[in-house]
Image (spheres, grey):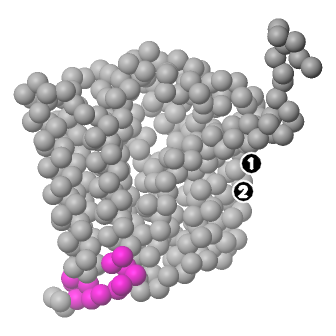
Amino acid sequence: MATENQVESPGVGTRVWNTLLAYIALTKPRVIELLLVSTIPVMLQADRGHVDIALIAITVIGGWLGAASANSLNMVADADIDQKMKRTQKRPLARHAVPVRHALVFGIVLAFASFAVLYYGTGQKWLPPILVWLTIAFYAGVYTLILKRRTWQNVIWGGAAGCTPALVGWAAVHGTLSWQPFVMFLVVFFWTPPHTWAIAMRYREDYRAAGVPMFPVIASDERVTTHMLVYTWLTVLTSFALIPVTSWIYLVVAVLSGVWFIYMITKSYLGVRRGVEVNALKLFLTSNEYLALLFCGLAVDAVINMPTIASYFS
């Protein structure tokens, strides 16, 4: 029986469970939600009127493994600054729940698992796994090690890593790419800065303490919201490029959600100019809701497969 000055160590079962949770946390499960939002609708659009559940499932699993690999390697590279930021101090490497070397091996193993699943699961198509490996290298190498700590434009260019699920989804269906997945790539590309800057405004002091030059750290709220408004317009206008190859369902969703998104960002921009404090969390959630509405609209449109807008003019 333990004395008052002794602390009972956790049992084997508890230690195993805590270790498992730590490895799961390395993959950043919440961040991977974007993978589902952008992969499945694009796959449905690539094969309008058909729903290949098996192919969708295997592509999502392979993509998830790739994203988990990229996120794990990102944590390895960011282990030092994660200890300095309040919102990341509970991450596995920051609290030493997982050795850095083990996390590195874990990330590499996930990358190979992703390649195998995507290659064999999509009928031995090379393009999907290659795109995922390029994404892992870009996110963990170019963005995390180079851009993130050196320039305020880090999320502008680094955000390209989060856009590739659209390309992977299309390639899983056709084995090649066309202009449509690149439109969705650009939608996510332009959407990423206002989305990320919103959360960066909320945790501005964290980034400043870690020495990460996020845009809201080095610029005024007025300048940040001005840029957010520009990228919001680019996002919405780009989404309209798919209207000719979709039906009135996507048209309505794209227009209404786009107008609402622009209105919300404009409202914040005008508020800042009047001296009103930015509700960063609200902007962050607004960006999430917009993208979810847009891609869900695309998915529904593709499944129902009504005549496209272009067909009325042909």
Where residue 30 sits in the image (x, y, percent)?
Answer: 51, 47
* Camera-side residue of 51 and 129: 51
Is 130 displayed left or right of 4 in the figure?
Answer: left
State the image quarter where residue 184 is shown.
Answer: bottom left
Looking at the rendering, the stretch of residues picked out in magenta corresponds to 300-311
> Where does residue 126 sit, x and y in percent of width and height?
62, 67
Name the quarter where the C terminus is drawn.
bottom left
Question: Which residue in the structure is indicated by mark 2?
Answer: 113
> What element does badge 1 sit on?
helix
Query: Which amino acid type corresponds to the residue marked 2 in the rendered image?
Result: Ala
State the residue at coordinates (33%, 78%). Answer: 301
167 in the magenta segment: no
Q: Looking at the rendering, in which quadrant would you find the N terminus?
A: top right
Q: Residue at x 37, y 79 (%)?
A: 302
- Asked if the residue at tag 1 contacts the one at tag 2, i.e. Cβ–Cβ closer than 8 Å, the answer is yes
**Can the viewer see residue 18 in this picture?**
yes
Q: Which mark is residue 109?
A: 1
Nearest the viewer among 86 and 162 is: 86
Dot 2: few (<14), some (14–19), or many (≥20) neighbours within 10 Å? some
Q: In the image, is 251 to the left or to the right of 17?
A: left
> Amino acid under label 1?
Val
Compute the Cα span from label 2 to label 1: 6 Å
